[in-house]
Amino acid sequence: MTVVLLLLGVLVLIIGGCACVVWAERGGPRWARVVATVTLTASELLRSSDKKRRRGLNSGSQGDD
């Protein structure tokens, strides 16, 4: 039950962050722009760490030839 609540909380934060990105794009209040910036920065960090992880996995598998 605790895991479900935790995942639900994360989902609410993600949806709220996406809503703030859209709202800030349309000229929302300052706090929405701050939340949008945090959301987009977190997205970029996750994307770049995933790319680095994939590169590490690919280079390790090629050494077996």
Image (spheres, rainbow, N blue to C red):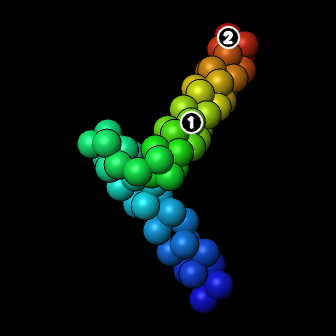
On the image, the x and y values in percent for residue 50 come to 59, 33
Task: Decide if residue 30 is on the left or right side of residue 18.
Answer: right
What type is the residue that disc 2 sits on? Asp
Which residue occupies the foreground of this view, 37 or 7? 37
Residue neighbourhood size for the residue with mark 1, other residues' Cα within 10 Å, grouped as few (<14), some (14–19), many (≥20): few
- From where the camera sits, is residue 18 visible? no
- Position of the C terminus, as image quadrant, is top right
How many C-alpha atoms fall within 10 Å of the one at disc 2: few (<14), some, or many (≥20)? few
Q: Nearer the viewer, residue 35 or 63?
A: 35
Residue 26 image point, x, y percent: 27, 42
Instruction: Give the mark, 1 or 2, whose residue is nearer the N terminus.
Output: 1
Tell which residue pokes out farthest to the bottom in this image. Answer: 1
- Identify the disc placed on residue 41: 1
Residue at the location (63% across, 20% down)? 55
Q: Furthest-left residue in view? A: 26
Percent coordinates x, y for residue 47 in the rendering: 54, 33
- Depth check: 63 or 17 in front? 17
- The amino acid type of the residue labelled 1 equals Thr
Q: Is residue 17 above or below residue 26?
A: below
Of the two numbered discs 1 and 2 in the rendering, the one whose residue sits closer to the viewer:
1
Q: Which mark is residue 65?
A: 2
CA gap, disc 1 to disc 2?
38 Å
